[in-house]
Amino acid sequence: MLEKRRVAVFGAGYIGLVTGACFASLGHDVVVRDIQRERIDILQNGGVPIHEDGLAELIAENADRLTFTLDAEEAVRESDVVYVCVDTPPTPSGDADLSRIWQVIGTLREARHLAAVVVKSTVPVGTGARVRAAMDRGGLQHVGYASNPEFTAEGHAVHDFMHPDRVVIGADDPETAKLVAQLHEGVDGPVVTMDVASAEMVKLAANALLATKISFANEIATICEATGADVEHVVHAVGLDHRLGPHYMKPGVGWGGSCFPKDSRALRAMASNSGYSFQMLSSVIEVNDLQPRRAVQRLKDELDGVLADRTIALLGIAFKPGTDDVREAPSTILASRLLAEGAAVRCWDPLAPPLETAPWSVATRYATPLEAMTGADAVIIVTEWPELREVAWEKAAAAMARPLIFDGRNLLDAQQMGSLGFTYMSVGRRTVRGTA
Ligand code: UDX
């Protein structure tokens, strides 16, 4: 039998909204609180301010157990558990800015009725201990504290929440661990409990290792380019070794998003703060910084060393398909590098919102991939949107000033592109020269 709880989720971003909607679908009463009026207005009027697969449906289906508010005290007053899902952006020193977490903790002064405070935001190891101390000083000694890091990937976060590989709960007392585990009753995955510091570390270590696998595949891709091997064959066969696995081995123009870049830098900064140089992670980050730059250089070489006054189409702006999120997207580095070389940039993306800041303010956006490519000297596939497989590439070949593709995600069939007359460049594979 589900022990129904009242949960206040602080933060109506990608994590908070998914967490709130999923807890509501599990049968709990949830109030989601955010400081952005616009966001709460949209939610109160039945809309959803972000794109996340299945989220709008989940919110609509559970509308009777889900409310939205700007009022922190109201949210806390009616709840047993406070879930902290606010963002923790990096500061100039590379530390995480915890001010939003402290603001939430600051609103709990009168909240002696709470059973627990749970932090889901990604935080440096040791944050929980500091929050615990602050709660103790504020007369909340009897309120439990837990860390419950999130491992959901954008685009399938609802599915990941409901069917996780594991639910990690870090708590220093068994009652709080039990309470957080009970909140997840109905979730299809094992619960792993540990101390707070270890749970905080799991999140950083997991993301760093995933980023490491991708950067490793990208390094192998570069060596494949130099030696004539085909990275797709290589990573496929390497991934069949059950000790290694096939995941996060897809080479490309680099990883982006709200987590890998921020969390890898935060882990490196955390290590550096204690005087330890995390060299391996520094290399992982450096390889990733190089990926879009190498792509531009390879394209430039193919265009006789000149990008100035060339027109380049970028297909995909979001950091990965299935999301409208453009945070730390490799597309931004690509666009900005191309502009720095004097090229004109055209772009297309099915979900990314209109972007008013540079480099996107200077790039021209088109409604379809074909329009973006018309008249272009080259096209770069930046995000592996499935729509790109359906493009009438023979029409694109005819419409472009020069049929040249740099497939930054190894999405298309090289031989087929060659037969359509394209010069087809990709990551870690030989360039195919058009035969049409
Ligand atoms: C990631 C983690 O997967 C998730 O567990 C954590 O909670 C948050 O960070 P997310 O940022 O949504 O999730 O994206 P993910 O799907 O993991 O991809 C991250 C980046 O790596 C994307 O830019 C993607 O294009 C890139 N990637 C991923 C590769 O380049 N190759 C791969 O093989 C896999």
Image (cartoon, grey):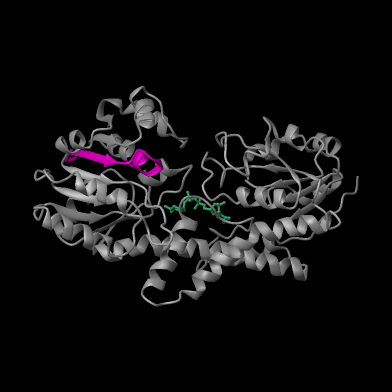
User: Foreground residue, 29 or 287?
Assistant: 287
How many numbered marks are there? 0
> Does the magenta-highlighted stretch encompass residue 155?
no
Left or right of 28: which side holds 410? right
User: Foreground residue, 61 or 30?
Assistant: 30
At x 82% / y 44%, what residue is drawn?
Answer: 377
User: Foreground residue, 374 or 432?
Assistant: 374
**What percent of the width, then of the height, locates residue 245?**
52, 63
Q: Look at the picture and state if 291 lies above or below 409.
A: below
> Does the magenta-highlighted stretch encompass residue 6?
yes
**What percent of the width, then of the height, locates residue 436?**
91, 44
Left or right of 87: which side holds 363? right
**What percent of the width, then of the height, locates residue 236?**
63, 61
Left or right of 152: which side holds 395? right
Please tell me in which quadrant of the rendered image residue 358 appears. top right
**What percent of the width, then of the height, locates residue 10?**
28, 42
Instruction: Judge whether residue 272 can be spotted in this image.
Output: yes
Q: Look at the picture and state if 312 lies above or below 130.
A: above
Q: Which residues are magenta?
A: 1-19
Q: Quadrant of the N terminus?
A: top left
Please tell me in which quadrant of the rendered image residue 54 appears. top left
At x 28% / y 43%, what residue is drawn?
Answer: 186
Left or right of 341: which side holds 22? left
Identify the residue at the far top of this view. 45
At x 57% / y 41%, what residue is drawn?
Answer: 357
Instruction: Judge whether residue 184 can be spotted in this image.
Output: no
At x 71% / y 57%, what residue is drawn?
Answer: 295
User: Foreground residue, 300 or 180?
Assistant: 300
